[in-house]
Amino acid sequence: MRYYTYFPGCSSSEGGAKAYGRSTQAVSKVLDIELIELDDWNCCGSTPYSSIEEIASFCLSARNLALAEKRGFDLVTPCSSCYVILNRTNSHLKEYPQLKAKVDEALGAGGMEYHGTVRVRHLLDVFINDIGYDAIAAKMKRSLGGLKVAAYYGCQMVRPRPSFDHPENPQSLDKLITSLGGEPVPFPLKSRCCGGSLIISEEALALDLIKKILDSASVNGAECLITPCPLCQTNLDAYQSRVNKKFKTNFNLPVLFFTQLMGIAFGLGEEDLGLKTCIVPTERVLAKYL
Amino acid sequence: MERRIGVYTCHCGSNIAGIVDCEGVTEFARGLDSVVIARDYKYMCSDPGQNLIKADIKEHGLNRVVVASCSPRMHEPTFRRACQDAGLNQYLFEMANIREHCSWVHVDKKMATEKAKALVSAAVRRVYYQEPLETKEVPVNPNVLVVGGGIAGIQAALEVADSGHQVYLVEKDPSIGGHMAMFDKTFPTLDCAACILTPKMTTVGQHPCIKLMTLSEVEDVSGYVGNFKVKIRKKAKYIDEEKCTGCGFCQELCPINVPSEFDCGLGKRKAIYIPSPYAVPNKAIIDAEKCSHLKGLAEGKDVCRICQKGIEKKGIVGCEADAIDFSQQDEIIEVEVGNIIVATGFQQFDPTVIYQYGYGRYDNVTTGLEFERMSNASGPTSGEVLLANGQKPESIAILHCVGSRDENYHKYCSRVCCMYSLKYSHLLREKVPEAAVYQLYIDMRCAGPGYEEFYERLQEEGVNFVRGRAGEITNIAERPEEEGKLIVICEDTLVRRKRRLPVDMVIMSCALEPRADAEQVARTFSLSRKADGFFLEKHPKLDPVATMTDGVFVVGCCQSPKDIPDTVAQASAAAARALAMISKGKVEIEAATAVVDEEHCAGCRVCVGLCPYKAISFDEEKKIAHINEAICKGCGVCVAACPSGAITGRHFTSEQIMAEIEGVLV
């Protein structure tokens, strides 16, 4: 059994990506991983907030790191956004002493301190590097026999700094799909922006970006997409019908979390997978694997 | 004998005096044991500075001298000479480095001064125990080894050979010529590369003083400056070079097609082939990995041999000169030389790793070298610029700095890319005048005679210069005019806009990088490498061809990226250095060598195996180790290893080193 401190983030705990949280826990259990939820965690600091209230955002983020430091394990999150924000807090506190002084003061007011020792990791990183593709494949109950999957990484997980995968041509999800018997399709827009939160403030612009991504996946023969990011999943899934309406297209591509796809291969049930929470229906494509 | 030590502290202008209190150091030195005089002066290395030392030696009867100044790499010989001139043995001099090791690396003046004092104290204590030593002179072997047969090696070999001295030119490929032989034209004069290079290549091939060894590699170098022993592996070509006439008929018979290295894989060659139309030597060779007969032999089968025996049914005879010899083996050739010139060149950066540029994924995304071959009349398209589908391009983008000036790959500027990119533009204007040509650059670096003028000329020729590094090349069209095109996405930093340039062809001006085998070559010739991987010269400004290994020189792109004029100049410089040593006829050997105390040597031979220079032999009669002083470099490995303490490193005795350490600590 391997132990990690778990930071679910707002989306996969109570938000729109509950299925992500559920499937993350279920798949981790199969892989002998124990994810111990961080007690009393709060918002990661969030990308939009950090552009408005920078210091406050860093303090929010650092509070999580301070809590995690006491536990001693690596801090794992399934959300790409949380991953980037928490990591950025870690590196900024090291690089900018003035920022650190302000954050230390804020933490101190709450009787907390942070020494910069927490390693923040993405769930996908833990799966492929700590567990490994072979060990994952060994847990497979049914192969995804030739299912054509577009691996959509989104823009955040592999940027701005190269971490566990290549920023321009990431491969980890593609290899994961292969090891589960699926077939990753060529997908040039695999790490292009999905529009992020602009879907709320600049809908036309975001819909255009979403359309390009769906188009690239579809042209290359994908039957579904997988992603490690709750916001990407929401944009590609929930706004697919609006894209169809606006651009007179007829995309019908289920968008799953990568943990849901792993869960299918591991033989888990709907209770753990939450496939019914997907807006674009998944049955047509996935029925034969269930 | 009483020790009378003089200490001289150098200000080096403000280089040292700006941080270190030189007067304070001098005052401190005056108080040290056995110091009879201490002075400080603005520039110790100047004539007046040296004269101070010389006068004091005579006037005050000094018998030991310490100079506290810069690194001994530059000026130790200067001060040693000054001591010699005044009648003091040069080994009774010691240098304290208070510049590189002190003033240049510290900011706290007080602490730096204290450190300078400690370094002076160490040098004074050390010099106390130093003994006079005599240097030896050995004759210089007048033969020269040149490694690498590109333009650098060719030039160096010709310069030496023209003076009548024997040159061994070793080239790993089947022909000399290197990268330059692959080029079409050369900037900025637009001379045809082959036209100016092939005369030199044939001269090398025919020169009575040059022994050319192609498909050969240096395996081992031993010895020392003036007297190197070199082991060369001459790989089997399976052709008797004496008999082969270079008629090329065998190539026509051979049924095996292989991508041609000379054409960057764009064209084909056979398994038996002459590497290029102007190959030197102009002889065939057989590619053992591709030849079906040689592959068959390994399995005990006798197949093919069409090149040798012809096709009987059709009445075609094989090699009439009977030059093909499938039984040929690699040969080891040993030569003795006095100097070695390393000219192993560069390799082109492989842009496959820059995924977003799509090299290897998209058709018509090419490298610079590929374009050179395509544009060359002897190349796979006979000099026509063609797309993969055989049509002419209507628009072409040239990307600068691919792999250069990029912290992900190479931080350095490859120096020649701006200019050869301009050359490509000119060739494109000439060959496909209807096509639009875009240059995507960061800065235009056109420093050199006629270079800026060439840049202006290209602006007048109607080339589109876009200031911005390409971010991505994609084939996903967003507008009708982009359909079926490669779209180069960049930020045009002059108009401050993101641009999408739809083009038919992209040429990437790739970085020049150290060859993949640079580390192995460095080890063979005892060279050091810079942070960027190129070979390290002795001094970047004042000694750019010599290396830290005496008698070994580096020239051309193995030292750093450079253009043809600079390469030729550097090659000539190295040849001049080698010839200077040859004409002097002898070389001084460092006296700081190891010596065996015959009384204490137990004959265990531990040192014999450890010596990296093979300087130690075992005297079977006396049953003791013997060190050849001419070969010994004084590295001290044997001194440290000797279990009975029977070996002493002259000028680095335990006494001297302990005294130096004590000097720093007190």
Image: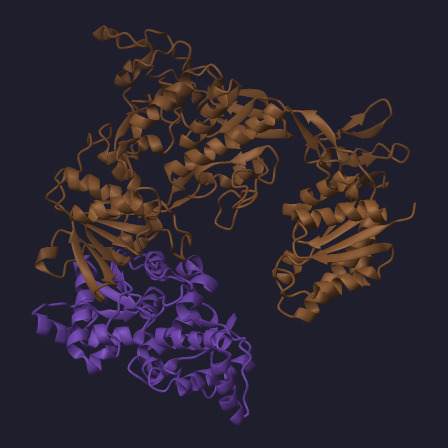
Which quarter of the figure is the C terminus of chain B placed in? bottom right
Q: Which hue is chain A drawn in?
A: purple
Q: Residue B584 placed where, x, y %?
A: 62, 25
Image colour for chain B is brown
Can see residue A168?
yes
Q: How is the image coloured?
A: by chain
Compared across the picture, whether B384 is left or right of B300 comes to left
Of B535 and B599, the residue lying toward us: B535
Q: Residue at x 50, y 28 (%)?
A: B146
Q: Is residue B177 left or right of residue B387?
A: right
Residue B118 falls in image quadrant: bottom right
**Whole-percent x and y of residue B656?**
82, 49
Image location of residue B351, percent across then percent down: 33, 48
Q: Residue at x 46, y 16 (%)?
A: B328
Picture quarter with the N terminus of chain B = top right
The residue closer to the viewer here, B643 or A173, is: B643
Q: Quadrant of residue B422?
A: top left
Question: Is B254 on the left or on the right of A238, as rendered?
Answer: right
Residue B258: image location, x then y, percent: 30, 29
User: What number of labels is visible?
Assistant: 0
- Among the 4 quarters of the image, the one containing residue A241: bottom left
The residue sitting at 11% across, 54% down in the picture is: B483
Q: Is residue B313 above or below residue B335?
A: above
Quick one: B491 or B359, which is closer to the camera? B491
